Amino acid sequence: MPHSNTADRADKGDAAHEVLAGVLRAHEGRLHVLLWQRAQPPHEHRWALPGGRLRADEDVETSIRRQLAEKVDVHKLSHVEQLSVFSAPDRVPGHRAVATAFLGLVPSDVDPEVPADTAWHPVDEPPATAFDHERITHAARARLSAKLSYTNIGFALAPAEFTISELRGIYSAALGYEVAATNLQRVLTRRGALSPTGRTMPAGPSGGRPPALFRFTNPGLEVTDPFAVFRPPTGRG
Amino acid sequence: MPHSNTADRADKGDAAHEVLAGVLRAHEGRLHVLLWQRAQPPHEHRWALPGGRLRADEDVETSIRRQLAEKVDVHKLSHVEQLSVFSAPDRVPGHRAVATAFLGLVPSDVDPEVPADTAWHPVDEPPATAFDHERITHAARARLSAKLSYTNIGFALAPAEFTISELRGIYSAALGYEVAATNLQRVLTRRGALSPTGRTMPAGPSGGRPPALFRFTNPGLEVTDPFAVFRPPTGRG
DNA sequence: GCAAAAGTGTTCGGTATACACCCATGC
DNA sequence: GCATGGGTGTATACCGAACACTTTTGC
């Protein structure tokens, strides 16, 4: 392994700290996770999340961004956020590894080049996964589902511009059930998350009204519905 | 010598993993955090969160529970949950320390014995704190505030049985602003979080109707308001 | 009876969903 | 004109906040 300055001490309490990311993308109606197939034991041939060891001079978010860019060639991560720590003593056989897990998102129109051992897999039907990486994938998906409800996190799954119908497909894929285009547009518009571009797409081959193009107002995560019950008397502002 | 374990090791690049907890309690109308005063450099005399080094045979939650019970004599933690990882390379001078931060809660009627160097401080006006512990405290408080809105986490702050007025005081302390007793009862009751015990407390010295005693239905964390917009068609009936 | 505190009824505004209806295009 | 898909208007249900009102006690 490179970066061995953090590994030359195999003290009991001094664990190697690793970072891992469940990188998700909506594609063809389903949500997919990026996995690479291990070539060596332990868990040879099983599929693992991208990640690696934390270096001495970086924090965990810097580390996961570096490793995703370096090792899996995902430059266009639209969003990265910390999930939680996975630290069961036996989660990786052979040595102690404490992992900080991340959620990463890639827009649906981006198809990054990935190494030969790496591929997208439907989150619903993952292949045989290594270590506790299926649990981490599940946590990533759960976080995404929750944040779709009360933030504008859809911006990280959608292309820069899109029709409501396309966005509906993305939300349906991410959530795992059908959402209504009507309400999707209404809710996101009311919250100010969607902005019309004024332009439209040509109608489809079977006719129909040409759809309008929208974009997300804010290209960064924001909480659009503070869902604050027991909020201060002066209301939410 | 208590509490010296987070600083007594000056490894160069080696990542010691530490666990820290912002332990919060509502008391006399304010929210307090448990801190201990450092006796030695670095950050001598400054106040720090309880915690310590992760052992080889435990996961992070086991570790923080052990350290809180062992070192700060808090047996009656009503709730513990992971916040996030703090990992800036220079967050602790002298050596690399990656910390997993936790939120811990203690019921308002519990006043655990703590060592001489340890005390409760109002979260609003903390003393001079060590390292990044004020940020961690802020994260703990933010998590608690958010979860008060959509979970039954109040169970962890309240006594086993309480009046609505007492509960109102606890929520107000935790949130930092006044909440109305009327709506507090209504919201928690509608969600099924509150159960009447059937008994009442005697009225106060200045008269008034004797208040009914309530308890939380579920003595564990549950999400009582899934705030699920874009929910499946078969929604919450 | 009166004051005080607890608890309930009612109104109001806001939000999400469902569904009917209108709009704009290809053929 | 007609089918097709996109978008809007309207009705309904529910939730939380505010506030008036009733209940139950001590004095």
Image (tube, coloured by chain):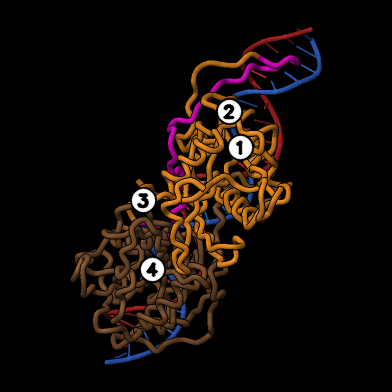
Chain colours: A orange, B brown, C red, D blue
Residue at image position (41%, 44%) is: A62
Q: Secondary structure at mark 4?
A: strand
Find residue A25 and name its label.
1
Identify residue for label 4: B21
Which range of residues does the magenta coloring cover? A203-232
Q: Name the residue nearer the viewer: A108 or B200.
A: A108
SS for tag 2?
loop
The reply to whether the magenta stretch includes residue A229 is yes
Are circles 4 and 2 on residues that touch, CB within 8 Å? no
Name the secondary structure under disc 3: loop
Do tags 2 and 1 sit on the same chain?
yes
Percent position (x, y) of residue B116?
A: 24, 84
Instruction: Give the label on residue B115, or none.
Output: none
Name which residue type carries label 3.
Gly
Give the label on residue A235, or none: 3
Q: CA distance from mark 4 to mark 3?
A: 31 Å
Quadrant where the image shows the C terminus of chain A: top left
Residue A211 in the image: x percent, y percent?
A: 61, 20
* Rendering quarter of residue A209: top right
Determine whether label 2 and label 1 are within 8 Å by CB: yes
The percent position of residue B194, horizontal first and vertical second, equals 52, 73
Label disc, if present, on residue A110 of the rendered structure: 2
